[in-house]
Amino acid sequence: MGKAGRVACIFTPYVLTIASLICIIFVGLGCTKASSNALNNLYFLRINLENMTSEGSKTTTEIENILSENGITDVSSSDVSDVIDQLKSDSTLADFYQIGLWGYCDGDITNNKKDVSTCSNPKAEFYFDPFSVWGLDDSSVKDELPSDYNKLMKIYKAVSKWMFIAYLIAFIATILAIVVGFFAICSRWGSCVTTLVAVFAFIFTAAGSITSTVLFSIFRSTLKGTLEAYGITLSMGKNIYVATWLATAFSLAAVIFWTFSVCCCSGRSPYGHRNNNRGIRSVPAEKAPYTYEPLGAGGQAPYGQQQNTSYPAPVAHGDYPAPNTTHQQSNAYEPFRHA
């Protein structure tokens, strides 16, 4: 297979790698621009505070049972109500908050329509700290929180940091795979190097997707029962998870096809042989059909006979030369081979 076949062979993994990069870019652009409705729909988790109230919809016993199931035993339902009262009185809250990879966005809800008003400045290794965002770091609200709050926030911060790093490495590795992929057109060695880079990109793309999905799923399931009793709802975004898992799927498919290009689709031409003396590829000349040559043409007559190379001189038309009995006798039984 020649160069054209080689180009056709790596076309599929190259397109898949580009598709994976586009999906990763969409994940990174979520919650970065308030004026873009498309980017505002890319979020990991949405916190809806529109119907927040200090009067729980469940009984005191039910709320305390939910708290104990989540490992919170030193907080009562009245403590939660006091925190929400202070939260509503001590700060100006938006109706909802959306968490992205680089920051968050907030906005108001009018006639069931969510309008994003502001987005935070993009920040590396971002994690959503509600009390910092709501300006309650120095208030007495934190005194009402369980003792495990700081421990849980440290875990959440560490996992969010790892998630950000995983996506960043996946982004860089995917770009590198696209650049190195140009060299895969030339040889299988180029495909081999590209495959290694593509595997590296896939590992971190999958790691980012798994981390984000598990992190916010646990976050939502842990706090859902307690917060919904006070009108606070948590919902996970759909578009950003579709984008991140599509990036993972495209990256995996690219690895498979890059590996295939290492084993197959050589760029060498199947014609011609390499000259051992000069290393130059050449095409052997073919002899004309129906031609013969004696086996002893290399200088030695077969069967130990002496080769007679004398031939009669040309004569005029109509005359026939006398037979050369010596030549005829020496070559009478000489075998011939087909060229």
Image (cartoon, rainbow, N blue to C red):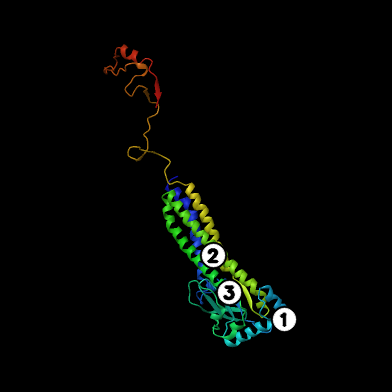
How many tags in the picture? Answer: 3
The quarter in which the C terminus is drawn is: top left
Q: Is residue 221 left or right of residue 185?
A: right
Q: Is residue 53 visible?
A: no
Q: Amino acid at mark 1?
A: Thr
Residue 319 in the image: state x and y as whole percent: 29, 14
- Which numbered disc flags the more N-terminal residue, 2 or 1? 1
Q: Residues within 10 Å of mark 3 (few under 14, many from 20)?
A: few
Q: Which residue is mark 3?
A: 151
Marks 3 and 2 sit apart, C-alpha to C-alpha, by 23 Å
- Which numbered disc flags the more N-terminal residue, 3 or 2? 3
Q: Amino acid at mark 2?
A: Gly
Q: Residues within 10 Å of mark 1 (few under 14, many from 20)?
A: few
For residue 208, the mark is 2
Residue 14 in the image: state x and y as whole percent: 47, 56
For the point 47% across and 52% down, the residue is 10
Give the farthest residue toward the bottom: 89
- Which numbered disc flags the more N-terminal residue, 1 or 3? 1
For numbered disc 3, what is the local secondary structure?
Answer: helix
Whether pointer 2 and pointer 1 mark residues with C-beta atoms closer than 8 Å, the reply is: no
Whether pointer 3 and pointer 2 mark residues with C-beta atoms closer than 8 Å, the reply is: no
For residue 60, the mark is 1
Q: Amino acid at mark 3?
A: Lys
Q: Is residue 82 visible?
A: yes
**Viewer-proximal residue among 106 and 216:** 216
Quadrant of res 1:
top left
